[in-house]
């Protein structure tokens, strides 16, 4: 499968790999994907770079910012669940060329996809309770709740600069309260969606996808997220949500303190609220 970047190489060369980093920076890749860099470490979570239609009734809306073989560095890839737009070997395989780089994902990911091109030594099963030391980052695997997946996890990343929660497509659950009690989360991502009209076997059906507005606010308060980044809301042509509605819904709740809407290519710096657009578009 060929992956074609909509932006050529400029973004990955000038922005992702070319930016100076102190502390922790995150770049939004689309869907729920992020690239995370520190002065010592580069991680990817849920990278997905396909432009192919996964299903007949939907198409990718955001641009594809890079081709994975262009990345200068990758110390590890983490995936939250088995859906193709979160775990897709052609997206993360080229990122694992480093000697010690591995993909970490729930067992169902390896069972439900063809991973024959990924060396077995680079396939790590991620289970709730696991922890990994990746450079200057500690990555904790915790439980989640994605009723549409065969198995899903969440990730908590700790660094001297702060703590990040990556929720994948998971929805409110008891594990979120436990995570909120265990960690002081500075920045967290949650998938935000809607009820979509989907075609199944020639029939149009209505189905809830991802977190509703109320779900996002409930989850953010259970996790006690200071700075919330909604994701996934522009993934599909036929299924989109308005992140602006979250600010009004959050008004009477303690969390989150800040809601930041990101576009593909935007940079977030841990400890410094405010989206930084790509340098090619006039950012820092």
Image (cartoon, grey):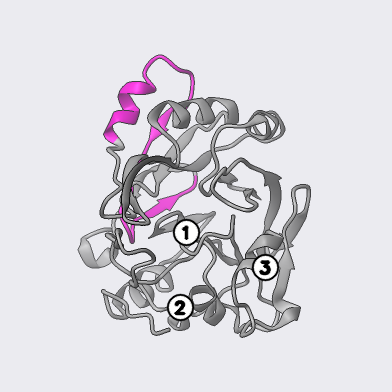
Figure quadrant of residue 60: bottom left
Figure quadrant of residue 115: bottom right
* SS assignment at label 1: strand
In the image, residue 45 above or below residue 17: above
Res 246 seen here: yes
Q: Residue 268 versus residue 147: which sits nearer the camera?
A: 147
Q: Residue 217 versus residue 227: which sits nearer the camera?
A: 217
For the residues labelled 3 and 1, the Cα–Cα distance comes to: 24 Å
Q: Which residue is disc 2 drawn over?
A: 68
Q: Residue at x 28, y 66 (%)?
A: 63
* SS assignment at label 3: helix
> Disc 3 vs disc 2: Cβ atoms closer than 8 Å?
no
For the residues labelled 2 and 1, the Cα–Cα distance comes to: 13 Å
* SS assignment at label 2: helix
For marks 2 and 1 on the same chain, the one whose residue lies earlier in the sequence: 1
In the image, residue 41 above or below residue 196: below
Q: Position of residue 241 (x, y in %)?
A: 30, 40
Region in magenta: 244-270
Q: Residue at x 60, y 79 (%)?
A: 96
Q: Residues within 10 Å of mark 1 (few under 14, many from 20)?
A: many
Q: Position of residue 130 (x, y in %)?
A: 78, 53
Q: Position of residue 5 (x, y in %)?
A: 31, 77
Residue 251 included in the magenta stretch of the image: yes
Quadrant of the drawing holding the C terminus: bottom left
Q: Residue at x 49, y 80 (%)?
A: 72
Q: Which residue is disc 3 drawn over?
A: 111
Q: Which residue is disc 1 drawn over?
A: 34
């Amino acid at each position: 499968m060929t992956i074609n970047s909509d932006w050529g190489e400029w973004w990955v060369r000038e922005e992702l790999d070319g930016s100076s980093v102190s502390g922790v920076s995150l770049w939004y890749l689309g869907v729920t994907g992020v690239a995370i860099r520190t002065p010592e470490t580069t991680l990817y979570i849920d990278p997905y770079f396909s432009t192919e239609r996964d299903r007949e009734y939907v198409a990718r809306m955001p641009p594809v910012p890079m081709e994975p073989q262009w990345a200068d560095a990758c110390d590890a890839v983490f995936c939250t669940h088995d859906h193709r737009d979160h775990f897709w070997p052609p997206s993360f395989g080229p990122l694992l060329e480093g000697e010690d780089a591995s993909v970490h994902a729930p067992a169902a990911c390896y069972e439900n996809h063809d991973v024959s091109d990924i060396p077995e030594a680079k396939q790590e099963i991620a289970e709730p309770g696991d922890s990994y030391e990746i450079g200057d980052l500690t990555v904790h695997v915790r439980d989640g709740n994605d009723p549409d997946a065969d198995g899903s996890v969440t990730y908590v990343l700790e660094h001297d600069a702060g703590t990040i929660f990556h929720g994948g497509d998971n929805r409110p659950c008891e594990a979120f309260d436990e995570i909120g009690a265990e960690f002081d989360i500075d920045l967290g991502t949650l998938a935000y969606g809607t009820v979509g009209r989907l075609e199944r076997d020639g029939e149009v059906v209505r189905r809830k996808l991802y977190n509703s507005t109320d779900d996002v606010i409930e989850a953010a308060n259970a996790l006690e997220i200071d700075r919330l980044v909604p994701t996934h809301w522009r993934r599909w042509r036929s299924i989109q949500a308005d992140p602006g509605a979250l600010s009004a819904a959050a008004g009477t709740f303690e969390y989150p303190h800040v809601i930041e809407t990101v576009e593909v290519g935007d940079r977030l710096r841990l400890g410094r609220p405010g989206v930084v657009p790509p340098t090619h578009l006039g950012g820092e």
